[in-house]
């Protein structure tokens, strides 16, 4: 991918390649070349040789100073789209694509939840559900999960009635 590229593992089978902007190679051409090379490989599954297929998602910068998190989220959206369209393909998510913006926001929220889980920033709260009649009766309980953010708590993350 070149000397200036940064390659890393996001987790599982998800890898990221950060390319410097500009020439010499367009990301789409490089991605298609990698996909084509990978499709020539096989792996053994028991006694059977299975073809290798890959999904490559490209998060394109609009040149407005997007964070790395935004670009990775856009690339993940492109991967999801490639999977929906039949796998073993390259897809590009452009910054001005309304779907990619929505998915990027979802991916960032998901990343925030993952970080909060790793940092143990969740709290369970239980509250009683009472009848409003003459004789107060506990009808059940509601369990809320809240995520701590800074000095306070973000609204409820989940709710269950028991």
Image (cartoon, grey):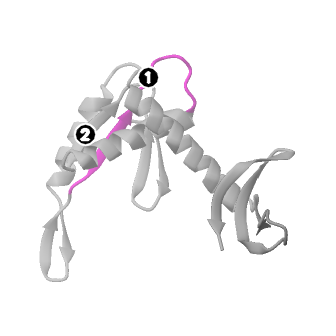
Left/right placement of residue 7 relative to residue 65 reads left
- Dominant SS of magenta comes to loop
Image spot of residue 12 (x, y percent): 44, 62
Q: Is residue 154 above or below residue 140?
A: above
Instruction: Identify residue for label 2.
Output: 90
Q: Residue at x 34, y 44 (%)?
A: 79
Q: Depth check: 149 or 65 in front?
A: 149
Magenta residues (range):
53-67
Location of residue 57 with respect to 159 vertically, above or below: above
Residue 5 appearing in the image: no
Q: Residues within 10 Å of mark 2 (few under 14, many from 20)?
A: many
Residue at numbered disc 1:
21
- Nearest the viewer among 75 and 38 is 75
Q: Is residue 104 magenta?
A: no
Q: Which quarter of the picture shows residue 57?
A: top left
Front-lying residue, 7 or 76: 76
C-alpha separation, residue under disc 2 versus residue under disc 1: 19 Å
**Magenta residue check for 58:** yes
19 in relation to 118, above or below:
above
Q: Position of residue 21 (x, y in %)?
A: 43, 22
Q: Residues within 10 Å of mark 1 (few under 14, many from 20)?
A: few
2 or 1: tag closer to the N-terminus:
1
């Amino acid at each position: 991918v070149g000397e200036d590229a940064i390659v890393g593992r996001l987790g599982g089978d998800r890898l990221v390649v950060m390319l410097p902007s500009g020439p010499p190679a367009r990301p789409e051409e490089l991605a298609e070349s990698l996909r084509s090379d990978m499709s020539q490989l096989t792996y053994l599954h028991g006694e059977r040789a299975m073809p290798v297929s890959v999904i490559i998602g490209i998060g394109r910068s609009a040149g407005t100073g997007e964070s790395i998190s935004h670009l990775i989220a856009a690339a993940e959206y492109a991967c999801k789209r490639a999977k929906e369209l039949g796998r073993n393909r390259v897809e590009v998510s452009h910054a001005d694509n309304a779907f990619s913006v929505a998915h990027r926001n979802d991916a960032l929220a998901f990343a925030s939840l993952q970080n909060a889980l790793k940092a143990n920033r969740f709290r369970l709260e239980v509250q009683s559900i009472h009848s409003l009649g003459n004789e107060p009766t506990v009808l059940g309980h509601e369990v809320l999960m809240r995520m701590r953010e800074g000095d306070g708590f973000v609204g409820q993350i989940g709710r269950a009635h028991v």
